[in-house]
Image (cartoon, coloured by chain):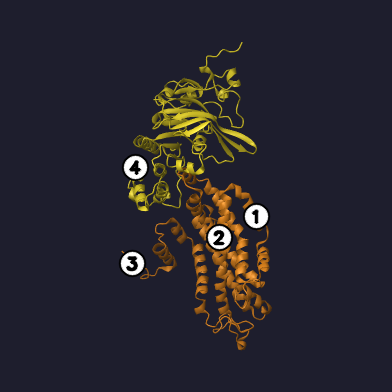
């Protein structure tokens, strides 16, 4: 009774169902079914996928090179030739925003991976070994005590402006958040009978951490990392707006806004479109994070409306 | 029958203390008992009497700090468990002593299939390939009476009912044919009909694999049906020890006597259940003298002043009560 998936109109939900069942092998999975019913999650996935596709296909979408200066076309408002207009050097804002998506996503992903790894290490150590708990978590509290943006600015400014340093700064700033989430779930999991049962079966600490503790911290961790992705996109924009992120002429949403700042009355489009891009990305990620939390842990579900 | 050979498990003066907020709380106080190979020992007592703590102490699973274990002797097959390194203890756990728990709902890792978890336990102790271990997992599931084990082996824990999960737990505990199984209230969280099934299964497997079982419970019916010998605990102490038939025929300690009386009889109408007045004393405020004295209908002055020792009537029978002592009240 196999029917070709595209032989009938299926709609977005149908497409998601096909992806989840055929490719992710989530047939009959409660999580997949809950995900398909959660329209906020689907909207979030849609928005974020859209931005990711922009970043991936930047080379094809940006017909005009992002750094091509065309003095004849300075300050042109959005038109067919320049969908988002041009800036004070006559560069195509659309190309710059699309390439900016690539940088933002690269930085966001790197921050998520780095702060995820270090958060898992510190959070697991603190949660599983009571002796280390106080030492590690007090250091994390100290980091959390600084306003995040200020700390990121301080670290990035000390290291000097570059993409790599912005990533390092943001990863340091967001490590305490992941560490706290991981520690909290490790503390709960450590008390579960299946951990005691594993000890009874002669398992070593490493084995228990790898097999029983880590996989069970994944759900809250993934949710938290989604939000960190969103924060990192904003924070990266702030850093490059202040000139301590990626170095121009590399276009980032932050430095496009910064460059448009002086012409904001006359050429609003220069700052407007990268701003919208940040908004869409962060909205998508936040919807995605909220939706994932609802799907992965229904007990924590927030009632919407 | 008591024989002069070394018992499988020998416990002498085992105490477990916990230190909380500067206070030292004694959860288990100088208890002693033996267990022969292939014997089923019941440990009965109210909540808070320390029975589960005994099981955890035998497995060396008491977290230190805040806990601490003292024992004059705690030996398994003549080997001292107290002096074992972590590494040696890991070899004992699972291989020689296994444990099953009260809550089958939380005893299985929710993110792996039951087959996966069984294979892990098997591979930890036996040099088998994944495929062989998987076949053994299916055999174990069949052994514990899970229908259609080939299909169930790929199920996740949330696909199974409580009774089925408890069977899986038993399969896991038996994966390496242990000589001793500690069953900590294995049926408390299950429905009555399922309780009987699981206990029948345990009894059957105990006979088949010739393992000793320590069955911890607060259900005297379970004790009567499935154990050979019983230890009654009250407030961290053993108050009576007896073969199961003797215990039910003629309890020596007033606590045991009242426990038996508080079981609802099947053959008469009873309007009120008998209950023992009062409750177990908090471990921070133990009475001096006999711990049961405040609730005991036979309590005399001496009971409130001095703690009675275990009076051993025969090798298998003992109780700690002043009424068993032919004492003279000092004039």
Q: Tell me the shade of chain A.
A: orange
Q: Read off the residue under disc 1.
A: A139
Indicate the position of residue A57 as horizontal and vertical percent values.
50, 75
Tag 3 near tag 1, CB within 8 Å:
no
Disc number lying in front (3 or 1): 1
Quadrant of the rendering where the N terminus of chain B is positioned = top left
Q: Earlier in the sequence, mark 3 or mark 2?
A: 3
Q: Are marks 2 and 4 on the same chain?
A: no
The disc placed on residue A116 is 2
Q: Earlier in the sequence, mark 1 or mark 2?
A: 2
Q: Using the image, tell me which numbered label, if any, was put on residue A247.
A: none
**Do the residues marked 3 and 4 share a common chain?**
no
Q: Position of residue A40 (x, y in %)?
A: 51, 63
- The reply to whether label 3 and label 1 mark residues of one chain is yes
Mark 4 nearby-residue class (10 Å; few <14, some 14–19, many ≥20): some
**Subunit under mark 4:** B
Pointer 4 residue: B143
Circle 4 — which element?
helix
Q: Of tags 3 and 2, which is closer to the observer?
A: 2
- Do the residues marked 1 and 2 share a common chain? yes
CA distance separating discs 2 and 4: 43 Å
Note whether B152 is above or below A237 in the view shown. Answer: above
Mark 1 and mark 4: span between their CA atoms? 52 Å
Quickly name the residue at label 3. A3
Residue at mark 1 to residue at mark 2: CA–CA distance: 17 Å
* Chain B painted colour: yellow
Q: Secondary structure at mark 2?
A: helix
């Amino acid at each position: 009774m196999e029917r070709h998936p595209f032989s009938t109109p299926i709609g977005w939900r149908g497409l998601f169902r096909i992806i989840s069942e055929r490719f992710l092998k989530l047939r009959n999975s409660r999580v997949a079914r809950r995900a398909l019913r959660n329209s906020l999650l689907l909207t979030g996935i849609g928005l974020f996928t859209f931005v990711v596709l922009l970043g991936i296909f930047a080379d094809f979408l940006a017909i005009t090179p992002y750094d091509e200066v065309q003095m004849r076309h300075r300050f042109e408002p959005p038109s067919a030739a320049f969908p988002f207009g041009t800036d004070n050097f006559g560069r195509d804002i659309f190309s710059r925003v699309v390439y900016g998506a690539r940088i933002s996503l690269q930085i966001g992903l790197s921050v998520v991976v780095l702060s995820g790894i270090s958060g898992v290490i510190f959070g697991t150590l603190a949660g599983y070994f009571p002796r280390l708990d106080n030492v590690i978590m007090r250091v994390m509290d100290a980091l959390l005590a600084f306003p995040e943006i200020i700390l990121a600015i301080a670290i990035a400014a000390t290291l000097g402006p570059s993409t790599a340093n912005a990533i390092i700064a943001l990863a340091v700033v967001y490590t305490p958040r992941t560490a706290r989430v991981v520690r909290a779930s490790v503390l709960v999991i450590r008390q579960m009978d299946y951990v005691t049962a594993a000890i009874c079966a002669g398992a070593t600490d490493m084995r228990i951490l790898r097999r029983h503790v880590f996989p069970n911290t994944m759900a809250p961790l993934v949710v938290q990392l989604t939000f960190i992705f969103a924060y990192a996109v904003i924070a990266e924009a702030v850093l490059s707006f202040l000139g301590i992120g990626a170095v121009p002429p590399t276009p980032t949403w932050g430095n496009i806004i910064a460059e448009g700042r002086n012409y904001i009355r006359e050429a609003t489009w220069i700052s407007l479109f990268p701003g919208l891009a940040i908004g869409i990305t962060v909205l998508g990620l936040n919807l995605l994070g909220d939706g994932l939390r609802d799907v992965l842990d229904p007990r924590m579900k927030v009632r919407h409306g | 029958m008591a024989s002069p050979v070394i018992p499988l498990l020998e416990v002498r003066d085992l105490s477990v203390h916990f230190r909380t907020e500067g206070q030292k709380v004694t959860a288990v106080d100088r208890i002693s008992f033996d267990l022969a190979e292939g014997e089923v020992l019941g440990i009965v007592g109210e909540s808070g009497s320390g029975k589960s703590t005994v099981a955890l102490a035998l497995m060396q699973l008491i977290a230190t700090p805040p806990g601490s274990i003292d024992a004059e002797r705690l030996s398994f097959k003549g080997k001292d468990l107290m002096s074992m390194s972590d590494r040696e203890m890991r070899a004992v756990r699972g291989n020689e002593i296994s444990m099953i728990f009260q809550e089958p709902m939380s005893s299985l890792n929710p993110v792996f299939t039951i087959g996966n978890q069984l294979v892990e336990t098997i591979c930890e102790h036996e040099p088998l390939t994944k495929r062989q271990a998987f076949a053994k997992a299916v055999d174990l599931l069949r052994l514990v009476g899970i229908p259609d084990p080939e299909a169930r082996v790929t199920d996740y824990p949330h696909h199974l009912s409580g009774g089925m999960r408890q069977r899986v737990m038993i399969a896991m505990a038996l994966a390496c044919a242990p000589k001793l199984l500690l069953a900590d209230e294995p049926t408390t969280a299950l429905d009555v009909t399922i309780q009987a099934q699981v206990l029948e299964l345990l009894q059957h497997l105990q006979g088949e694999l010739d393992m000793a079982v320590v069955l911890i419970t607060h259900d005297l019916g379970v004790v009567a049906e499935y154990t050979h010998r019983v230890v009654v605990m009250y407030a961290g102490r053993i108050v009576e020890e007896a073969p199961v038939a003797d215990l039910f025929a003629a309890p020596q300690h007033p606590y045991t006597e009242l426990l038996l009386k508080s079981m609802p009889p099947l053959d008469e109408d009873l309007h009120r259940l008998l209950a023992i007045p009062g409750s177990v004393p908090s471990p921070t405020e133990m009475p001096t003298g006999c711990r049961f004295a405040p609730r005991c209908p036979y309590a005399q002055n001496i009971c409130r002043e001095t703690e009675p020792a275990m009076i051993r009537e025969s090798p298998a029978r003992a109780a700690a009560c002043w009424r068993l002592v032919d004492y003279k009240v000092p004039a």
